[in-house]
Structures are given as structure tokens and as C-alpha cells.
Amino acid sequence: MARGNRLLRRLLKHRETRSPHFAPISAEQVLNRAAALLAATLISGAVAWTAMSAWAAEPSEWPPGGEWPGLTANLIGAAGFAIVAAVLVYGTFRPVTSAAVAALYAVAQGCLLAWLGTAFDLGSGGLLANALLGTVLTGLAALAIRRAPWGTRASLVVVPATAATGLAALALVNAALAATGRGLFATAVPWWGWCLVLVLAVWSAYSYRVDLDLLDEHLATGAEDAWPAALAVATGPVGVYVWRLSDFRSRSIETSY
């Protein structure tokens, strides 16, 4: 599972040529941009999830069409998927240097995750929404821990700390919303569901650790543009499934010959 993020791998192969007019970027610059993109994903996802949940609760009134979880929600989800897929595919061939495209991806990623959490909850009491939100919060935790003096220590230290921080943030979100009476997530999630969220948090923490290690390799080449690397790191909420599952598949294919 160590191959990791295809966008970062592409940047390592790209080997940007140093220019006398620009100094190499720092890890801090990339981490700041990546955190901003993940924050945009979190905000857009929260807004979209709130709207889609309201539409799904009253399908006969709004949106028109009646398709679960609503025609408008499905259109937003489809648009989010199209943008995310297009940027990921493009990024595997050429670095995405546009800040506007990176921001668009972050918003689309939030809308896509919100749609998945609404459309495929299947009566699980908000389990999927919790799991997807946990991947975003774990990513923000990974970026915060990376800035700490011990943030580059062994994975046996950093990965559990990242997962624990992400889960703590998820618990705080649930507690805060429960205290307001809004009830973002239902309380009917079974105990084994929370075990799955725990496993996903550890998996996400490991995925972000692999990506940040790849980022260090990229920065060591004297990279001059922070946005391609920041976008690559910010793809974590989707990449935790895309990159890791494709790693499993590619390894099984290689070992079958």
C-alpha cells in the first residue's frame, strides 16, 4: 500500500526545472494551502449535506422529481463526481497549477462526499456520513501534526496520534450538534459501525502519512509551485479509497503472475 497518491507520484516524475526567479517552496507553504483546501471541502460538504438532508426529508415538496435523495441533490452529486474525476485524471498526466481549479476541486469534493453520505446512508443512522466526515477531519489532523516537532517520527507514533485526533474531532462535532438539538447524526449507529469508523480513521491516517512522506520527496527536488502538491494532499478524502484500493488491486495482479 506504499505507492500512494498518483498525483504526488506524477510530481515526483515531473521534476520541475529550477528557475533563477523563484525560490523552492517550503513544506509550510504546501501545508497551508492543503489545509485551506481541506477546510473548503469540509465547509462545502457541511452546507451540501444540510441542504440534501432537508430535501430528502420532504421529497414530495422539494426538489422536484422525487428521485432519492432528490433531483437537485443527484445533480449536485453528479457534478461533484464529474469535477473530481476530471481533476484526478488530468492530474495524473500533468500537474494542476491553478489555484482556482484546486479550489473548485475542494468544493466539488465536499459536495460529492455530502451526496454519498446522504444517498447511500441506507438507514444506517448517519454511519456513512460520519465515516466520510472522519476522513476529512483526519486529514486536517494529519496536517496539524505534521507541523509539530515530532510530526515526522515513525508511523507507529504519528499514525495512531493522527487517527485519535481525527476521531476526537469527529466526536466533538457530534457532541456539539447534539447539544444544539439539531441532530446531524442519528444515535442508532450500532457498535460495530463505530468500529468501522475507527478502522477507517486509522486507514486514513496511514494514507495521509504516506502522502506527506511523498510530499517530502517532492519538495527535496526543489519544486517551485505549491498548488500541485497542495491539491494532491487535499485529494486525501477521495484518495483514501481510490489510491489505496487501486494499490491492493495492482499488487494482487502483480503477484498472480
Image: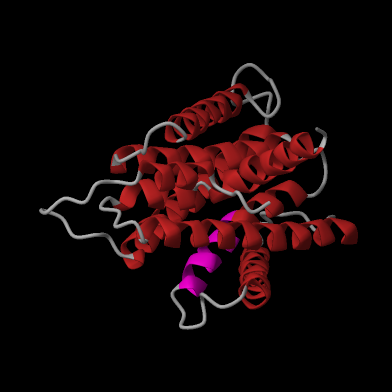
Give the answer, above or below, for where 114 lies relative to 127. above
> Which residue occupies the extreme left position in the image?
21
User: Is-magenta flag for residue 116?
Assistant: no
Residue at x 30%, y 43% (from the top left corner):
99
Left of 152 or right of it: where is 177? right
Which one is in front, 19 or 102?
Answer: 19
Residue 218 percent across, percent down from the top left: 40, 55
Give the answer, above or below, for where 22 lies relative to 103. below
Residue at x 51%, y 82% (from the top left corner):
150
User: Is-magenta flag for residue 139?
Assistant: yes
Residue 171 percent across, percent down from the top left: 68, 68
Residue 57 percent across, percent down from the top left: 69, 36
Which one is in front, 162 or 36?
Answer: 162
Quarter occupied by residue 100: top left
Which range of residues does the magenta coloring cover? 136-146
> Which residue occupies the extreme top position in the image?
65
Colouring convention used in this rendered image of the protein:
secondary structure
